[in-house]
Amino acid sequence: MAATNNMKHISYPEGKALDEFVEKRQRNGLIWQSVFLLATLIGIIALVALLYNIINSAFGYVALQNAIDPDALVLSVEENRLLNATNLTSSEDDEELVSGITGNPYAIGFFGYAYYQESQDALNILSVEGVEPTAENVESGDYPLSRPLFLYTDADRLLDNPAAAAFIQFYLDNVNGVIDDVGYFPISETTLDEDRNVLSRALGDSTVDANAGGELIMAGSSTVYPLSRQIATMFQENGFAGTIDLQSVGSSAGLAQFCRRGSDVDIANASRAINRTEFEACRDARRDPLEFQVGTDALAMVVSSQNTFLENVTLDELREIFTGAELWSDVNESWPAEPIVRYIPGIDSGTLDFFAEEVFQRDLRDLPKETLVEILESNISAGLMRRFENDQPFAERSQENIYELVQERVVEPTVVATWTLRESLFNRADIASFVQDVPNGTLEFRSWLTTRFITSPQSSTPDDAGIRTAILGSLWVILITIVFSLPLGVGAAIYLEEYAQKNWFNRMIETNINNLAGVPSIIYGMLGLAIFVRIMEPLTSGTLFGASDPTTANGRTVLSAGLTLGLLILPLIIINAREAIRAVPNSLRQASYGLGATKWQTIWNHVLPVAIPGILTGNILAMSRAIGETAPLVVIGASTFIVVDPSSPFAKFTTLPIQIYQWTSRPQDEFRNIAAAAIIALLILLLSLNAGAVILRNRFSTRV
C-alpha cells in the first residue's frame, strides 16, 4: 500500500514541459558530443604535430666539413693509375708530347687544342663519342672534353699591385680578339661582362690605373700560357712600363704558388676550376680567390698522322686505353695487336686533372674494394692498418665496410650544421650560402634513418652512431617481461575470477591490484633496484649459474630490467585478463559442467580459448607501455652509452627509449636528428610487435 502511495506522488512532464525537457536533454547531449569531438580533434592535432616534428627532424640538409676532400682522393687515385700505366711518357713540356706522338703510329696522347693546331700536319685529332672539337661543338658543350680557361687573383693583390688590375682589365677587353689566333675558342660577351663585374666589386671605390707600372708575376697552366703570353705582349706594346714574369708550371703548381702564404704570384693561370683543397689553402693564406673565365679549350685527343685505324673513341675506350689495356686489340678487336704507347701531361698539369675528372668520373663510394684498401694504406698508420686486419681481414670485408672505414679514418667528415626538412625545402639559397663559407664544406640531403643507422652500434659521433645495440636490448627486455608477466598475470586473473571466494582478503587483493596500476613507473624502478639488482644480485647477474658477465656489476642486467617491467605491467595484464574471462558466458561453463567436466577442464578447454583474444588485447596494451618506459630502467642502472650487444639475460643493456633520452639531452643539433630517427624506429618496432600480437589474437578468434 505504501508503494502505491509513493507511485501516486511521482509526476512526469507533460505537454510543453515534456518538450522543454526533451530539448534540454538534446542540448546536453549536443554539448557532450561537441566536447568529445573537440577532445578527439585535439588528440589528432597533437599526434599530427608530434609526427610532423619527428619527420621534420629526421630528414634534411647537412653541412659536412671533411678533413680530406673525397673528390680529391678519387682524383689522386685515378691520376696514379694513369701515371703508373706501362709504355707511358709524362711531361709538362707539350712539345715533348707532340714529338713522341708524331713519331709512333701506335702512340696516343692529349693536350690543349692550341698545341694540336701548331702541329696538326703531323697529328690526327680524334672525335670523342662521335663529336669533333669544333668551335660550334665546344661552345654548345656537345664535345665531351671541352673546358673553360681561368685566371685567378684576389682583391688584396689587385689593390696592392695596380698593375695586376690593369692587366686583367686589358685581358678581358682584348682576349676575344686574339684567342682564335692562339688556337682556343672565345667566350660570350655575357661571361666577359660578369668577369668585369667581379673585377669592379673587388676594387670597390678604387679605379683601374691604366698607366700603372711595376712587376707582374703570373704562374700556372701550360695550356693557358700561350694565350696569356700573347696578351702580355700586347699589354707591353700598349705602354706597360713594368716587367711581366710569366711561368708555365702547370695549373696545380701555379695555384699552389698563388695560395701559399707570402707568395709573390699576382695571377694564377688554370686550365680547370680551382678545387676545394686549393680554395681552402688560399683562404688559409688569407687570399679569397677571384675567378675570371677568359676562354674555352677543347682537350685534343691525338694520334700520329701515320695512324690508320683510329678516328673516333668513346669515353669507355679512353678509360681502357690509358689504364687497363696493354694492346690496342685489348680495347677493340679490330685494332692491331700492338702495344699502346701513351703520352700525357705531368702530375702538376691542370690538363691531367681535367682529363681524369672527365673520363674517370666516379664517386668515392663507387671505387672497388682493392682501391679503397690502397687509400687506407696511404693515409693511416701501419699500426692502425694491422689492427683493422686483425679485427677482420680486408679480404673478408665488404666494399661497403671498407668504404665506411675510409670515410671514418681518412675523409673524417664532421657535421657543421643541420637543417630540418622544412628549412631544407624553403631556405635552400641561405643554406647554400652558408656552406660556401665552410672550409672543405659539402652539402648533402640526408635521411638520418638508414640501414647503416639501424645496424650500427652506439658511437660518440652522430655520423657513426646507430641503434643496433638499443634495439637488441629492447627486444631482450620485452621478451623477459612477457615471459615473466603474461603467465603470472593470466594465472592471477583465473584465480580471482574462477576460484577466489568473495571475502575481505580477496577484496583487498583486488583493490591493491587496481591501485598498483596507477603507481608511477619510477616507484617500480626503485623496487626493482632494491629487489632484483641488490637482494637478488647472485641470480640476476648470473653468478649463481656461473654465467655472469665480468663487466656487469651489481645485477644491472637485462634480467633485472625485464623483471622490473614485468612488475610494472602485471596489474594491467591481471585487470584486462579478468575482464576477458568475466565476459565469457556462464552458459558455456554450465554446459561443460553438465557434460561432467571438472572446473579446470572447463577453464582450460572452454573459458580460456574464448577469453584469449581479450587477454591478448590487454597484453598488447601492457607491452606497448613497457617498451616505451625509461624511468624505471634508468633507476636500475641501464647503460646510456654501450657499444657491446647484449648476448644473454645477464648482459649489460640499453633500450631505444633510453638511447633517445640520452641523445635529446645532448647540445648538438645532429644528436636531436638521430634521436628523431630513433623515435621513428621505435614506433616501427612497436607497431611491428603489436601487429604480430594482433595477428595472433585474430587467429585465436577465428579458431573459436
Image (cartoon, rainbow, N blue to C red):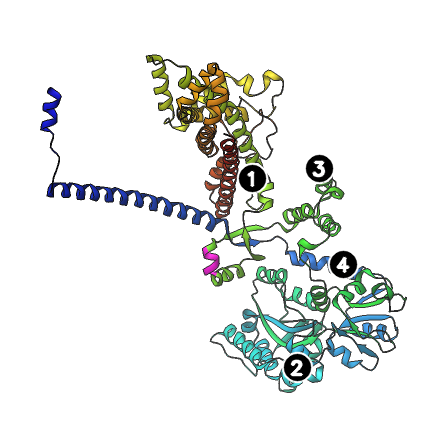
- From the viewer's perspective, tell me whether residue 167 is left or right of residue 42: right
Question: How much space separates mark 4 and mark 1, taking CA atoms?
Answer: 39 Å
Residue type, mark 1 in image: Ile
| Residue depicted at 57% across the width and 35% down the height | 469
Question: How much space separates mark 2 and mark 1, taking CA atoms?
Answer: 62 Å
Q: Nearer the viewer, mark 3 or mark 4?
A: 3
Residue type, mark 2 in image: Ile
The residue to which callout 3 is attached is 391
Q: Nearer the viewer, residue 252 or 159?
A: 252
Q: Nearer the viewer, mark 4 or mark 1?
A: 1
- State whether residue 11 appears in this view: yes
| Residue depicted at 69% across the width and 74% down the height | 143
- From the viewer's perspective, tell me whether residue 482 is left or right of residue 335: left
Neighbours of disc 4 within 10 Å: few (<14), some (14-19), many (20+): some
Secondary structure of the magenta portion, mostly?
helix
The residue to which callout 1 is attached is 467
Neighbours of disc 2 within 10 Å: few (<14), some (14-19), many (20+): many
Question: How much space separates mark 2 and mark 3, taking CA atoms?
Answer: 61 Å
Counting residues from the N terminus, which is met first, the one under dot 3 or under dot 4? 4
Point out the stretch of residues depicted in magenta: 422-427
The residue to which callout 4 is attached is 80
Counting residues from the N terminus, which is met first, the one under dot 4 or under dot 1? 4
Q: Can you give x and y, in whole percent of width and height, for residue 108 in the image?
A: 82, 70
Residue 231 is marked as: 2
Q: Nearer the viewer, residue 656 or 465?
A: 656
